[in-house]
Amino acid sequence: MLAIAQIKNQKEELAQRLGIRGLDGEDLLNQVLALDEKRRAVQQEADAAANEMNVISKQIGQLFKEGKTEEANAAKAKTGELKEKAKTFADQLQAIENEQRELLYTIPNAPHTSVPKGNSEEDNEVVKSVGEIPEMADDALPHWELAKKYNVFDLELGVKLTGAGFPVYRNKGAKLQRALIQLFLDNATAMGYEEIQPPLMINEASGIGTGQLPDKEGQMYHVTADDFYLIPTAEVPITNLFRDMILDEDAFPIKMCGYTPCFRREAGSYGKDVKGLNRLHQFDKVEIVQFAHPDKSYQVLEEMVTYVETLLVKLELPYRILRLCGGDLSFASALTYDFEVWSAAQGRWLEVSSISNFETFQANRMKCRYRDADNKKHLVHTLNGSALALPRIVASLLENHQTSEGIRIPEALAKYTGFDLLN
RNA sequence: GGAGGAAUGGCAGAGUGGUCGAAUGCGGUGGUCUUGAAAACCAUUGUACCGCGAGGUACCGGGGGUUCGAAUCCCUCUUCCUCCGCCA
């Protein structure tokens, strides 16, 4: 959520940046500021009324102490009206604060100035494209066929156990999952990321902290008996590790990574793009998270992008990097790079990573700040990215590396699988 | 799951209705002393909001209530500890 102070100080700039999403930023921010003005006026009234009550209460106490019971009781009699007034203003203040917070919850992050305008994925900017798109034989199979052929995963069995979108990985397929996770974690920790194993369920406060709640409630599985949510990504628990924290400036950079299963309801998304591993309700992912000094966060973002590239190179997959346009940018992000790998048999690009700088948007919600050399507190910048999400990597590995003997496992990965041919 | 106890500032820990935003100790910061350091001593040291300022308001796990007045009393939720039961 945008911070009031930020809106006051940089209204023009923020309004312009919100315009990249196709929003009337000027109007939205004016609404916030108008409410804020009202809030301040009411607070002054409320504070004054509370002060009156406090003063008179102290006087009554003093009178009782001095034994002037009659005077004390006389003063008491006069408090009713004051109390009423104080309560009215306090309620008003509360109501305006709620209104303001709700308004702020509806305003997405202001995109970075480099974000292209646009309405859909058509308008995303291709920043880089690496690797040859392989020429496939006519009888090349999509990954769900290969999975059947080599017993990699079974979606029908998942339906039996749970429902659609919960795959059962088998045999070398299961080993491949484990190998990918280990490869990703080893690489991340070698880059200085601290490995975290977080809880897979989070409470409401955590959901609000990273921006999943209140608006995207329907995307998470809700365990109503205990009011917990299954995490849609490790970003949520790992970022919230630093909720309500004041960091020292020299603590930067803070780098964390973690493997978790991710649970997403994906309500309302059906059709051909859900085939195979393309879209699932449960999938595995290694996430990288950084907390950065505001002056350094875009440098950090580039560093994260460069890191994820190294993984795709090791997996020998053709990939491209997109800078998401305003219309495709997620609610909390200021700038997002998506990574896509080529799916040879489907003939399309599959998103396998999304790396974002949230600037202070999450930090403001989470109250995550740092203290500068002058002891002043500022909001930190938070960033995260998938490094990487497994299912579409598996889909792409199967399809791109298929041979008549089986699936060729790239050398860097074969060290972890213990086999270089999946057959 | 059952029975008890507890939750106070960075930490430890007082405080059971009225100058308590909160004693004291430790820690932090600044200073005195010292060639330097340590020790000792002195001062200072929570967060947020409002206000040009003086100053004001709120916060003692969360929420609600009683009262002129709540850290203190009541209700409720959460968490932690002890004991019993169950269990990977």
Image (cartoon, coloured by chain):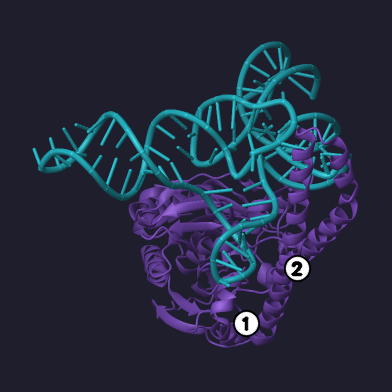
Chain colours: A purple, B cyan
Say whether residue A420 is visible. Answer: no
Disc 1 residue type (three-letter): Gly
Residue A206 located left or right of residue B86: left
Q: Which chain carries label 1?
A: A
Q: How crowded is mark 2: few (under 14 residues within 10 Å), some or many (20 or more)?
A: some
Identify which residue is drawn at 60% across, 84% down.
A15
- Label 2 sits on a secondary structure element that is helix
Q: Residues within 10 Å of mark 1 (few under 14, many from 20)?
A: many
Q: Mark 2 lies on which chain?
A: A
Who is closer to the viewer here, A347 or A421? A347
Q: In which quarter of the image is residue A332?
A: bottom right
Give the mark nearest the N terminus, 2 or 1: 2
The percent coordinates of residue A175 (x first, y second) are: 49, 47
Q: Residue A42 carries which label?
A: 2
Who is closer to the viewer here, B26 or A280? B26
Disc 2 residue type (three-letter): Val
The percent coordinates of residue B31 (x first, y second) are: 27, 47
Give the alpha-carbon distance from disc 2 to disc 1, as whole Å.
37 Å
- Label 1 sits on a secondary structure element that is loop
Residue A266 located left or right of residue A299: right
Q: In which quarter of the image is residue A145?
A: bottom right
Position of A84 relative to A395 (above/below): above
Who is closer to the viewer here, B57 or A340? B57
Residue under label 1: A327
Disc 2 versus disc 1: nearer the observer: 2
